[in-house]
Image (cartoon, rainbow, N blue to C red):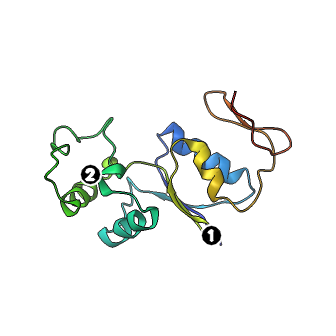
Amino acid sequence: MSNITIYHNPQCGTSRNVLALIRNTGVEPVIVEYLVTPPTREKLQELIAQMAMPVRDLLRRKGTPYDKLQLDYPGLSDDALITAMLAHPILINRPIVVTPLGTRLCRPSETVLELLALPQTGAFAKEDGEQVIDDRGGRVADQ
């Protein structure tokens, strides 16, 4: 059984890249397609606490009802923001990855490397062609 969970949207390139980087360690994570199976309020609150991030920072704006729901209003409580995310899971930014090393919102996709205990098994390039891991499994230096 995997000790890695990814809250995944298969329509998101970043989420697909993160999933591929996890699999490049030889591990098959637990995949939660959160648009199909949204987290409970308790689980979402737990994830936010584990990430030690403000609730507002987990909100996704692009391609969501964020503006229509006027979620930029500063007077909205964390509880109201969480309620909006539960009603419209597309508002939850992704991917969120949970491993024994921590829980993170993995944007950009390379962020997941900080959470993986096992090394990369080979070369990896993101969907846009950017090389992230070399053929020996090492991180490619920023150009």
Question: Residue 52 sits in which quadrant?
Answer: bottom left
Name the residue rendered at 27%, 55% in the picture: 85
Q: Residue at x 33, y 68 (%)?
A: 40
- Identify the mark at residue 45; answer none if there is no mark: none
**Is residue 44 rendered to the left or right of residue 138?**
left
Query: Where residue 127 sits in the image (x, y, percent)?
Result: 62, 32
Left or right of residue 84, residue 117 in this image: right
Q: Position of residue 15 (x, y in %)?
A: 52, 45
What's the residue at 26%, 60% (across, down)?
A: 82
Depth check: give the residue in front, 94 or 139. Answer: 139
Which mark sits nearer the N-terminus, 2 or 1? Answer: 1
Query: Element under label 2?
Result: loop
Q: Amino acid at mark 2?
A: His
Q: Percent position (x, y) of residue 124?
A: 73, 39
Residue at (45, 67) in percent of width and height: 50
Within-10-Å neighbours for mark 1: few <14, some 14–19, many 20+: few
Q: Which residue is mark 2?
A: 88
Report the amino acid beneath label 1.
Answer: Asn
Residue underneath mark 1: 3
Q: Quadrant of the C terminus?
A: top right
In this rendering, would 141 be left or right of 37?
A: right
Q: Is residue 87 above or below residue 141?
A: below
